[in-house]
Image (cartoon, grey):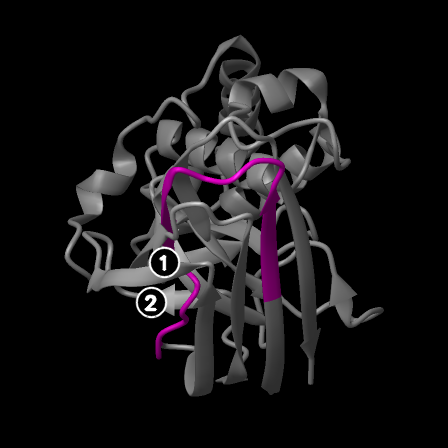
Amino acid sequence: MRLKITHLTQYSYDEPVTFGLLKLRMRPQNGISQNVEDWNYSFQGGAHQVDFIDHFGNQTDLFRLDSGTLSVQISAEGLVETEDRSGVVGKHKGPAPLWVFEAETEATKPGAQMRTLIRDIRAATADLDSVARLHHLSEAIGEAVEYQTGETNSKTSAETALTEGRGVCQDHAHIMIGTARALGYPARYVSGYLMMNDRVDQEASHAWCEVYTDALGWVGFDVSNGYCPDERYVRIAYGRDYADAAPIVGIRQGPGNENLQVSLQIQQ
């Protein structure tokens, strides 16, 4: 499938910014299920400082905001050819060793509710192989946590989202990662894009998780939608949790409030 992606992010400020840095992970790379045919990237309201491959293998760009700016515009667009591999990414590659994805993080660390889910999954899937067990886990998380926007944010932990029973793709991914690790599987967070079947315009990019199994290597699970990533998905970045793979993170100095507007279109 050939996907056209147009992603525009705009920040506006009530007062001039005195200093700011933004770290961007918004450039897809060629991989096992995708080939980047064309990708254009622009930044207004600041100057590019450096680009590098981070310790997970993600293409990363650092921009410094212009002193006194009142707005920043980030544009990313291009064409990506994708392939349906039923979520299977395959054997582990990259600069970070596999054991890095076994350790707990603050975002994914199990609490009482997650430990209960882990016990239930162990009991219910004792006779299943790893892939079947993980599908069962994904379904259980989807049933326990209703997809609902506006209830969580980037700082919400997996345990909090599971306890409250509401969240978005980021929360679903964090819960799956934390529980899979507790069950003995390396797991990682993936940020990227998903072409929706019913619309072109979207409000945000997407996130899912990948879990490592001895039989298949890395396998993707999109808990929010209830299936493994197919040809409608484009991978951008991955890491231990959201903080390692977030499309945009940064710091800013200035007295004003920040307003964010996102325009995203994904179509075949």
Report the number of discs. 2
The vertical placement of 197 against 181, above or below, is below
Quadrant for the C terminus in the image: bottom right
State the SS at label 2.
strand
Mark 2–mark 1 distance (CA, rounded to whole Å):
5 Å
State the SS at label 1.
strand
- Is tag 2's residue or tag 1's residue first in the polypeptide sequence? 2
Q: Is residue 206 magenta?
A: no
Give residue 46's quadrant in the image. bottom left
Quadrant for the N terminus in the image: bottom right
Residue at (60, 76) in percent of width and height = 5
User: What is the three-letter code of the residue carrying label 1?
Assistant: Trp
Residue at (45, 45) in percent of width and height = 68
Give the magenta-colored segment's residue range.
Answer: 8-31
User: What is the three-letter code of the residue carrying label 2?
Assistant: Gly
Q: Is residue 30 magenta?
A: yes
| Towards the viewer: 195 or 93 | 195
Where does label 2 land, which residue?
Answer: 90
Asked whether disc 2 touches disc 1, contact meaning CB atoms under 8 Å apart, the reply is yes
Residue 137 in picture, x, y percent from top left: 57, 38
Residue at (64, 57) in percent of width and height = 227
Q: Decide if residue 47 is on the left or right side of residue 1.
A: left
Where does label 1 land, which residue?
Answer: 218
Q: Residues within 10 Å of mark 2 (few under 14, many from 20)?
A: some
Q: Is residue 59 visible?
A: no
The vertical placement of 58 against 113, above or below, is below
| Towards the viewer: 37 or 135 | 37
| Towards the viewer: 143 or 128 | 143
